[in-house]
Image (spheres, rainbow, N blue to C red):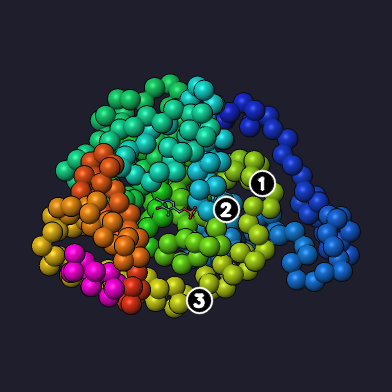
Amino acid sequence: MNFNLSNILRENIKKLTPYSSARSEFKGEAEIFLDANENNFSKRYNRYPDPLQFGLKEEIGRIKNLKKENIFLGNGSDEAIDLLFRIFCNPGKDNVIICPPTYGMYEVCANINDVEAIKIPLIAENFDLNVDEILRNVDENTKMIFICNPNNPTGNLIDEEKILKILNSFNKIVVIDEAYIDFAGQPSYIEKLKNYPNLVILQTFSKAYGLAGLRIGMAFASEEIIQVFNKIKPPYNINSASQEIALKVLQNKDGLDNLIKKTLSEKERLIEEVSKLDFLVKIYPSYGNFLFIKVKNADELHSHLSTKKIVVRNRNAMSLCHGCLRITVGNEEENDILLKELREF
Ligand SMILES: *Cc1c(COP(=O)(O)O)cnc(C)c1O
């Protein structure tokens, strides 16, 4: 496959002179910092954060077996998604392929950037990719294909052969969003990065790591692609407090494992109990931290739960998701209350 990064970057991005921050210009050992107009009378968070998040990336690299140069950190993966559009897609001209029902931000970011999102629906029976149709719809202006694995909201894994076929056949950018990979018991596609210069993988601190409020998302890709991310990102996109807390959480492996273990065991309990409900039509196999279920009367159930102050995601109106709700696995107490209200419905 002939992949040429320089050929698919936007011209203005290729030519861009990036913002040069005070801290990134100084190389060497300094003690007195009078270069960034900070307030040196204040102590705790008076300094601008590390623009390239050195410490946090080192720890992520250790855990994921990657070099820092292959890691970009964004203000949530949502920032990485938006930057991908701005790196590769000419507004009003280029397009991307998305496969609904899937994560909503791909289309929203496309719209914000005035990029057409060509929709190739997942296969109705198993929510897997319709690879032939995807490849048939690729044209010269198609810059990216988005694959969500495991998929949100349907919870399923995408067949590996299908993903490889796309990676092998499409010589622009293939984005694999692995927001739920830590719940899936499956290897990440990180291992494939060395074989595929067109691959960008997204992961996040928001789900398994339990840090949605800190807003940290990760993109893994070739050094060349990560360099372009770094060139166009806002200089201080991850604040100091987030960098510090995320690093501490990552260093506590037992704590992280425990969060995932608890979620998975509560998920099993929910599956077992929800299976007994007589209005249930189907529980789809889910590899995330949520259940995706089809019920006889989704809207009524959704509003019943709302009156009981329980919010779940109603996907009834989404194409291919008729009658479906997405329910996040809560903690023990929350799940007890949810199950009680489901039984009473
Ligand atoms: C939750 C989620 C994200 C996470 O986004 P953040 O901005 O990192 O919080 C990304 N992709 C998918 C598919 C998700 O479900």
- Residue 223: x and y, percent? 57, 46
First-in-chain label (3 vs 1): 1
On screen, 111 above or below 140?
A: below
Callout 2, which amino acid?
Answer: Asn
Q: Cβ of disc 2 within 8 Å of ligand 1?
A: yes
- Which residues are drawn in magenta? 335-345
Toward which corner of the image does residue 214 lie, by quadrant? bottom right
For label 3, the crowd category at 10 Å Cα-Cα, with few meaning under 14, some 14 to 19 and many 20 or more, is few
Mark 3, residue position: 252
Q: Mark 1 = which residue?
A: 234
Residue at position x 77%, y 62% in the image: 47
Q: Name the residue under label 2.
A: 75
Along the polypeptide, which appears first: circle 1 or circle 2? Answer: 2
Q: What element carries label 2?
A: loop
Q: Which amino acid does label 3 sit on?
A: Asn
Q: Residue at 30% across / 51% down in the picture?
A: 314
What is the spatial separation of the Cα atoms under label 1 and label 2, in whole angstroms? 10 Å
Q: Which residue is drawn at 50% across and 76% down?
A: 252
Where residue 272 appears, x then y in whole percent?
A: 17, 70
Taking the view exactly as shown, the residue that stands out farthest to the left is: 278
Q: Is residue 122 visible?
A: no
**Residue 336 falls within the magenta-colored stretch:** yes
Nearest-to-viewer mark from 3 and 1: 1
Q: Which of 144 and 296 is in front in this view?
A: 296
Residue 278 to residue 97: above or below: below
- The kind of residue tagged 1 is Pro
Q: Does the magenta stretch include residue 80?
A: no
